[in-house]
Amino acid sequence: MVKVGISACFFYADRQRPIFKGMTLQYIEQNMAHWVMQRDAMALMIPSPDGDTRRASSTLRVDDYARELDALVLMGGSDVSPESYGERALKPEWNGDRIRDQYEIALLNAFIDARKAVLGVCRGAQVINVAFGGTLYQDLATQFRGALNHRNWDIYAENCHATSIVPGSKLAGLYRDRALSKTNSVHHQAVKDLGRNLVVEAWSEPDHVVEAVRWTGPSYVFGVQWHPEFHDGGDRSFIDDTPLLDDFLAHAKRPS
């Protein structure tokens, strides 16, 4: 059985919260776990080994997870901190989560070193770009003239746009009959300057925002800006999430 590690989201200590008051929570979102599990892969959250607790620090590191697991999903969530790509936040609300950035970049590097497959989703795709030296638009509405509304809080995962797959790309090989499709859109940041040895696999239409990236190095590293785990398959105008998942898991099964 393939064992897929999923990076954790963080809720930091909050003494105003009535449950787990003053405690930091690490968690994964249910749709992501179930998306991975639908192909009988085992989904396992990878807790950050760092942080203040009442327990002695463990010697367990992210490299140990990379050695024991078959693949990694970098899931969505909070903004990537502009500090992670050498900038300052244009607004306080765009400060992002520098702690999570460092944890996930360390995870990414550990799985790359172990030649294990990595899939980044939404924030995860942005983390991949930043890890390879790329930058992000801190806010599309502010910094990208003519950008579509890539995030709508009222309809959330139902917000969507057209996405075109780059001809001749790896993604085009997975979707031979779907050069243009619909994807959901739940983000306000996006890839700006492309990281080293990354190629664009898909764009949003008509504004041409990067929607998928792939590393050209020796192991599988792929990132998509949309949330495949939110697709339910009921609307055939949306891109089918299963070829992407199957390709990722096929690479997870290959010996490193």
Image (tube, rainbow, N blue to C red):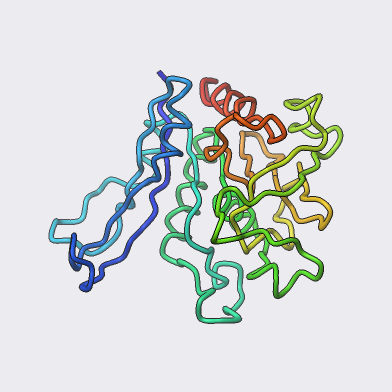
Q: Image point 70% across, 55% down: which residue? A: 195
Q: Image point 69% across, 58% down: which residue? A: 191
**Quadrant hosting residue 151:** bottom right
- Does residue 161 sit above or below 117 in this rendering? below
**Quadrant hosting residue 214:** top right
Which is more toward the observer, 210 or 34? 34
Q: Indicate left or right for 152 with 192 as reference.
A: left
- Does residue 199 sit above or below 250 in this rendering? below
**Residue 253 spot, x, y in % from top left:** 51, 20
Which image quarter holds the N terminus?
top left
Q: How many marks?
A: 0
Q: Image point 57% across, 21% down: which residue? A: 250
**Residue 222 spot, x, y in % from top left:** 63, 40
Q: Indicate left or right for 28 with 83 as reference.
A: left
- Does residue 75 sit above or below 142 in this rendering? above
Q: Indicate left or right for 54 with 145 as reference.
A: left
**Residue 119 spot, x, y in % from top left:** 56, 39
**Residue 216 spot, x, y in % from top left:** 72, 40
Which is more toward the observer, 236 or 169? 236
Q: Indicate left or right for 204 with 88 as reference.
A: right
